Amino acid sequence: MATKPTEQTIATKIMANTCPRYEHAVQVICKRWTGLLLDALMEGPRRFGELTVLVDGLSDRVLSDRLRELEAEGIVKRVVYPQIPVRVEYQLTEKGYALKPVTDAIHNWAEGWVDPASLTELVEKNCDG
């Protein structure tokens, strides 16, 4: 008689079959706010203050943490311009720009599948559709 698999055995099998690279990539790019930061940086270098305006609701502390994490992954580069006052910009690296098809795919998916009526007025303000 066959036994019915439990949730734990299913989860164990899924984890055993998950590619570690895929798992790491998802953990990096799916953290809260990261997708919005990547999208904002796709258009070019941004200063810290610009990013706080573009990603509404993101605290300075979390923004700083996410930028540091993305920099450690080689996705974002912090560029310091030695002038008075010092100017700092964040920009995507080649590795970061390689995520463009991913952000574009999410935009396309959202356009077709996310119901604007279920969202707040942000949709009208920020989306093209």
Image (spheres, rainbow, N blue to C red):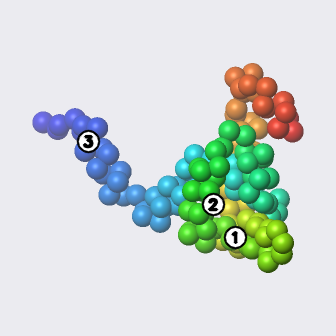
| CA separation in Å, label 2 and label 3 | 35 Å
| Nearer to the camera, 104 or 47 | 47
Callout 2 secondary element: helix
Residue underneath mark 3: 8
Name the residue at 32% across, 57% down: 16
Q: Residues within 10 Å of mark 2 (few under 14, many from 20)?
A: many
Query: Of the residues under marks 3 and 1, which one precedes in the sequence?
Result: 3
Residue 33 seen by the camera: yes
Residue underneath mark 2: 67
Q: Residues within 10 Å of mark 3 (few under 14, many from 20)?
A: few
- Of the residues shown, which amino acid type is indicated by label 3? Gln
- Whether 25 is drawn above or below 82: the answer is above
- Of the residues shown, which amino acid type is indicated by label 1? Arg
- Of the residues shown, which amino acid type is indicated by label 2? Leu
Residue underneath mark 1: 78
Measured as percent of width and height from the top left, residue 33 is found at 63, 47
Q: Residues within 10 Å of mark 1 (few under 14, many from 20)?
A: some
Tell me if label 2 and label 3 are in contact, CB under 8 Å: no
| CA separation in Å, label 1 and label 2 | 9 Å
Instruction: Give the left or right position of residue 84, taking residue 79 as reference.
Output: right
Name the residue at 28% across, 50% down: 12
Residue 34 seen by the camera: no
